[in-house]
Amino acid sequence: MSSPEEDFQRGFDKVARRATHELDAKFESLGEAEVRHRLESKQGLHSLEWAAARAWLAAKETERAVRANAHSAESVSISRKALSNSQLATRIAVVALILSVIMAVQKLIEWGAR
């Protein structure tokens, strides 16, 4: 059996989750620009919603930063692969150059032996 305090806390948590969900839905429907505008102008949002709006905007910025970081990691991976391919191409070119020098020296030796 739970105490009245635990019952109160559970009820409070349930109401808080529902209110947060409703505010998130409201902010999503308005969009970031409008929420930011209403927050800055202090119009169109109740003063009790200001903290939730700031938290929602911060969460959106965090999501954007996470996506940007993921894109950066992907870019780094692509760059590393390109570097590896370029190093391989350089090695192949050096080998081809060495072979062509060897062949040129061989032709010069054959030409001088005549």
Image: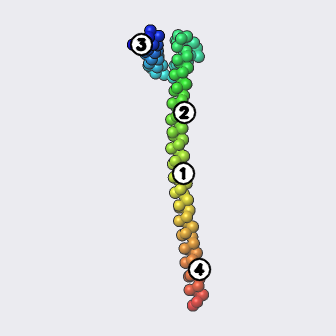
Of badges 3 and 1, nearer the viewer stands: 3
Q: Earlier in the sequence, mark 1 or mark 2?
A: 2
Q: Which residue is mark 1?
A: 80
Q: Amino acid at mark 4?
A: Val
Q: Amino acid at mark 1?
A: Arg
| Distance from the alpha carbon under mark 4 to that under mark 3 | 95 Å
SS type, badge 3: loop
SS type, badge 2: helix
Q: Earlier in the sequence, mark 4 or mark 1?
A: 1
Residue ID at (51%, 40%): 71
Q: Residue furthest left?
A: 1
SS type, badge 4: helix
Residue ID at (54%, 28%): 61
Q: Earlier in the sequence, mark 4 or mark 3?
A: 3
Q: Nearer the viewer, residue 14 or 92?
A: 14
**Image position of 4 (left or right of 41):** left
x and y percentages locating residue 34 in the rendered image:
52, 19
x and y percentages locating residue 31 in the rendered image:
48, 22
At label 4, counting other C-alpha atoms closer than 10 Å, the crowd grade (few under 14, some 14-19, many 20 or more) is few
Q: Which residue is mark 2?
A: 65
Of badges 4 and 3, nearer the viewer stands: 3
Vertical position of residue 69 compared to residue 112: above or below: above
Quarter holding the N terminus?
A: top left
| Distance from the alpha carbon under mark 1 to that under mark 2 | 22 Å
Of badges 4 and 2, nearer the viewer stands: 2
Of badges 3 and 2, nearer the viewer stands: 3
Q: Which residue is mark 3?
A: 2
At label 3, counting other C-alpha atoms closer than 10 Å, the crowd grade (few under 14, some 14-19, many 20 or more) is few
